[in-house]
Image (cartoon, coloured by chain):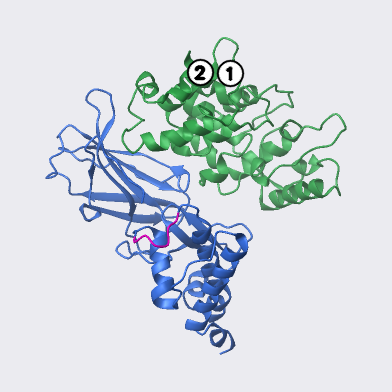
Chain colours: A green, B blue
Amino acid sequence: MYINRLNDNGIIEFRNQLQELRLGTRHQLETSFLNDEKFISPFEEEIEIENIEFANKNDISTYLVDKLSLTNNKQLYYDVGLWTYLSVFYFHLLCPSDKSGNINIKADARYILADPKNWTRYYRHLLACPARLLCELGNLSDSFLASPIHIWGDFHEQLTAYQDIATNKPLIETANVLYWDTSALRLKKGAGSKGGGSPRRFSDIVGQFELTYDLNVMKSPDILTLFPSEFNRWTA
Amino acid sequence: MIRKYNYTGRQKISQDRISIKQDVSGDILSFNADLKIHDLGLPDHAKVYIEPYFKSSFMRFDFGSVARIQSPTDTYLIDIPITDRVLYRLKIVDESDEKGLILGFADEIVAKNNINDGNKSPLLPVDFNELNNRVWKLDFRDEGPVLCANTDSRIEKIREIVAKDQRFLSLVYPEVIRQIALNIASDEDFDFTDNGNSWQHKWVKYFKLSLGIVYSPNSKEDKDLIEWSDEVSDAFCKTNRIIDLLIN
């Protein structure tokens, strides 16, 4: 199928279907409106996408960044119709059914890219945000992108909720030193916890550091020395 | 009282040394900055950054060094939504040994533009932005409560409605006042007897001097907080003759 954009009608149709799925008056998303001109507007280029069973955020982000040449077309970061169209197309990956065939619909912001310059909503989108992080951070985004597309852990929440943290390369490099297992290519055990030394504490403490240091210009090893002993267990 | 330490000798730069002006072009804001920081004793080589932000949206612009301030050619706020309430942060940073020590700092700088006069600091600022299907909401931000109104094109003359429409004032503001009072009362760390300068203290001063609410909630129990907030709202309605506003 070729990439298009959802127009206003298409976004309303998608939003309505999401609500029907939540209420149980609908049991699966009807995606045929992706082929209906009433609901879509054409994309500038003919870009074909395939319905691949991507294993995680990294695989699908790599695919979409390549297809859209996103690194060179950063204005597409904010393209509401494009990312919402892709959400419908890959909806079975964004919202897979459980063993009983039930699907758990999350907030609209996970699927519909509304108000794209407002990071409070942007970072929740399950396709736009991972693809953007891959473009901006390169391999440093591995820790964000290793999980299945629909999974939203506390690590992701704490480190991407604020744009000044999510786009700060030395800081993300520091978070990776603490929480990312480079040999197993997964988050270290306990990285999703909420106690001392957790990603939640990381983002809290960074806010205090920022009163004294400009973390954008520091090197990751220097940032690491600022952290209190509660974080030592990750580097021991 | 919260004690604040400043071990590194960081200078707090007065906002009257910083003038930021905003322009709106289509759906993108841009800005320019006039900085008077040359006589603060900061090292010439220290780098100057300006960081506009709105809630969790953030951008960063390199303005050269203390000795040679240079505006970037592009100051479009492509990552910030259209809003009247963009705030700016100024950082003067020593990068000489990559330690990134902040030598000078100013925060919550309000720009001047054709909509919002940056010299004014109202108790309840109003912001106009996207609110999906809501007409208004009260948003508690770091700088305090902000009344937000929806810029959806289906609502004609929203700025006039918010500023002058007596029905809007009479129906919305009592609830705004109630929410603010409840938020302050619910804050475990807030001390009603402290003469601080936080936004909470400014509002409590308003409750006392303008509405005659000279007492604080009886306890931190929900029922007392709710009762006190209702009394503040009722006092607001009485003082401002809110029912008359609606029926006349």
Label 2 Cα crowd, 10 Å radius (few <14 / some 14-19 / many 20+)? some
Q: Residue furthest top?
A: A183
What main secondary structure does the magenta stretch of the protein show?
loop
Question: The N terminus of chain A is located in which quarter?
Answer: top right
Residue B83 vs residue B216, the one in the foreground: B216
Residue B121 vs residue B52, the one in the foreground: B121
> On screen, A15 above or below B145?
above
In magenta segment, residue B193: yes
Residue B8 vs residue B187, the one in the foreground: B187
Tags 1 and 2 both on a single chain: yes
Q: Is residue B218 visible?
A: yes
In the figure, is residue B108 to the left or right of A35?
left
Q: Chain of mark 1?
A: A
> On screen, B53 above or below A49?
below
Q: Are marks 1 and 2 in contact (CB under 8 Å)?
A: yes
* Image quarter of residue A156: top right
Label 1 Cα crowd, 10 Å radius (few <14 / some 14-19 / many 20+)? some
Which of the labelled discs sits on residue A188, or is there none? 1
Q: Is residue A166 visible?
A: no
**Residue at which label 2 appears:** A234
> On screen, A132 above or below A114?
above
Residue stretch rendered in magenta on the structure = B190-195
Type of amino acid under label 2 = Trp
